[in-house]
Image: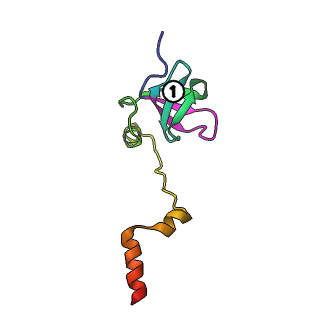
Amino acid sequence: MIKMFDVGRICVKLAGRDANKVCVVIDIIDDKFVLIDGQTRRRKCNIMHLEPLKQKVKISKKASHDVVVKELKKAGIKVSEKKVKRTKKTDKKGTKKEKEEIKTSKKK
C-alpha cells in the first residue's frame, strides 16, 4: 500500500477555518490523524480534511515552523508571516528598561 500522507507531503486543507490553504505534514499521529503546519496553524488534522499534492519537501519529523516556511518558499509557495498581537497587559508591563526610562523622563 502506498502512503499518501508521509512527512513532508504538501497538502491543501479542505475543511475548517484554514480551508484552501497549503500545509505540510509534519508528523503522522495514527492512521486517521496527522500534524500539519504551513499557511495553516500547526495542529492535528483528520486526513479526510486534506488533499495531498504531488509535491513533497525535505523536512524532518516535527520540524519547526521556520523550517517549514523556508521549505515551502523553496517550493514556490508563499507563506505570510504572522504578527505578534500586543495586549493591554503586555503594553502596561513593558520591560524593566522601558519602566526606568519612563521614571527618569517623569523626574525631569
Q: Residue at x 40, y 32 (%)?
A: 62
Determine whether 103 is above or below 51 in the image. below
In the image, residue 16 sits, relative to residue 7, either above or below, namely below
> Can you tell which quarter of the image residue 103 is in?
bottom left
Image location (x, y in percent) of residue 42:
50, 38
Colour scheme of the picture: rainbow
For the residue pair 44 and 39, the one nearer the viewer reads as 44
In-image side of 51 versus 10 (left or right): right
Residue closer to the observer: 32 or 94: 94
In the displayed image of the protein, which residue is found farthest to the top?
1
Residue under the point 54% across and 62% down: 87
- Local secondary structure at mark 1: strand
Task: State the extent of the magenta-drawn residues as a range.
Answer: 9-26
Name the residue: 52% across, 41% down.
41
Q: Nearer the viewer, residue 76 or 64?
A: 64
Q: Position of residue 23 (x, y in %)?
A: 49, 35
Badge 1, how many Cα within 10 Å: few under 14, some, many 20+? many
Q: Which residue is mark 1?
A: 34
